[in-house]
Amino acid sequence: MVFSSVEFLYFYLPAALLLCTLAPKKFRNAALFASGLVFYAFGEPIYVFVLLASCAIDYFAGLLMTKHDAEPKIRKLCLCASVIMNLGLLGVFKYTAFFAEIINSVFRTALPANIWAGISNALFGTRFSLSAIVLPIGISFFTFQSMSYTIDLYLRKISVQRSFVNFGAYVTMFPQIVAGPIVRYSEVSERLENRSVSASGLSEGVTRFTRGLAKKVLLANGIGRLWAEVKAEDFSEMAALTAWLGIVAFALQLYFDFSGYSDMAIGLGKMLGFEFPENFDLPYTSKSVREFWRRWHMTLGGWFKSYVYIPLGGSREGTLKTVRNLAIVWLLTGLWHGASLNFVLWGAWFGVLIIAEKLFLGKALEKLPDFFRWLYTILAVIFGWVLFDTPTLSSAGGFYSAMFGGGGAFADRESFRLICEYSLTMSLCIFFASDASGNFREKIDSKLSAAGVKINIFDIVRPTVTLCLLIASTAYLVNEGYNPFLYFNF
């Protein structure tokens, strides 16, 4: 996938934008559909058929649901078929190897080694393993996006889309297909049928895209090198300060990588005449875990709230069912991110914290000064990120041990080398991840206004800043080459 490569930036992207913008109105969605398929084929050409299958499942389910509009049982059957088939695709590609490994572990424990070896060899070859299955890029995103169409249609929140090309254009829109934001059909249906690109929309889109590109290549990739160095070390001999520097670097890398992609997608959407939903709102400024998840990956949180939490009863049916519903949502959230015990525990960690805040911890936090509420939140999130980016429970345990002095030292030469080498990059990341940049702008605006200056200086310098960021990002891409986004793995 070349979404952050020079080739994409200067060849595919301009060609796709021109094709989708200059095509006659009745062919624009066809151009958008084709552009999405070509873009997706960059990652793994064979899996274009998986993407098309997902489109076909929900398109035909929608037509059948509308045809039998007065027959509730058939409508429900169409919905069930859509959900089962979509989740089936997701399950086969994303979770088969995970469950195969669980089966291996269970039978290896329950049966003598020689008996299980003979059974597995007879049935599955040398052992029951399907780890060779390659995960289609962004399958979790486009499956949820496509499936939301049939759910909303069943709930009569939207009208059916009778054109397969138009529906395919919605599912495969290249700006956001592989890493979100997750766009619901209701949010773009009107503009699928009738959209135009204005000069202001194009300007806003270019600015937003460039900001996202700079987040990714200048900040995320820069601070990500620190985490890569730390993760490659022996955790059992790592100084505590090194471990903390590493996991803070990963927290910043993940934010700028993912929010950068979202900004790029939103910017490209504006250039094409669409308004995609926001996906991030300075999550590291949050003062509770519940607030953090209202600000981080907002479209995924909204999806689970609309299609899982509320249908289960939300918080309307008493404390026990509220706890149950939250537990289900966070188990599914963990599994959505990845097929491993680490992701399951990661979801459980945040689920427990959110349940605790809902029941009693939230009221206690409200009595604390803002700084301590923020500190609690950021530490809770950082502890969660350890599970998120370590491959096994044992490696996560080793890293937690290092964070609390298990390596035998608080700091060493490596710690101070990392501080010296990455202090500027980390400072910039912290500045832009906080609301300091917004506060800075407000202060400048206030002082200029008090001085009688009516011109918005930021509007004047924005084109120059955008151009400089584009040049700097391009130079980085030329030197670094391949720069995959972290959420392409989901």
Image (tube, rainbow, N blue to C red):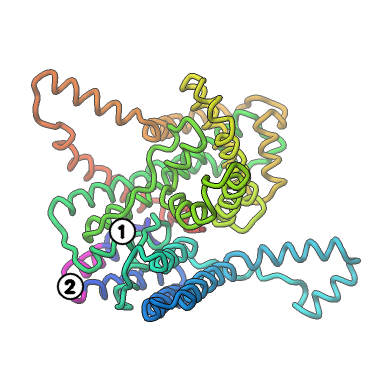
Q: Secondary structure at mark 1?
A: helix
Q: Is any part of residue 486 visible from this angle?
A: yes
Q: Which residue is mark 2?
A: 23
Side of 408 relative to 1 (left or right) = right
Residue at left offset 45%, top offset 35%: 284
Q: Quadrant of residue 119?
A: bottom right
User: Eyeballing the image, is 425 above or below 336?
Assistant: above
Q: Position of residue 328 (x, y in %)?
A: 60, 52
Left/right placement of residue 467 relative to residue 119 reads left
State whether residue 360 is above or below residue 222.
above
Crowding around mark 1 (Cα neighbors within 10 Å: few <14, some 14 to 19, many 20+) is: few
Query: For the residue marked with disc 1, what is the amino acid?
Result: Glu
The residue indicated by pointer 1 is: 187
Q: Which of the two marks, 1 or 2, is nearer to us in this view?
A: 1
- Boundaries of the magenta span: 14-27
Amino acid type, callout 2: Ala
Relative to the observer, which residue lies in front, 428 or 153?
A: 153
Residue sitting at x 70%, y 70%: 129
Residue 177 found in image quarter: bottom left
- Secondary structure at badge 2 equals loop
Residue at left offset 46%, top offset 62%: 144
Q: x, y (%) of residue 2?
A: 39, 61
Magenta segment main secondary structure: helix
Q: Give 313 or 426, whichever is nearer the viewer.
A: 313
**Which corner quadrant of the image does residue 483 belong to?**
bottom left
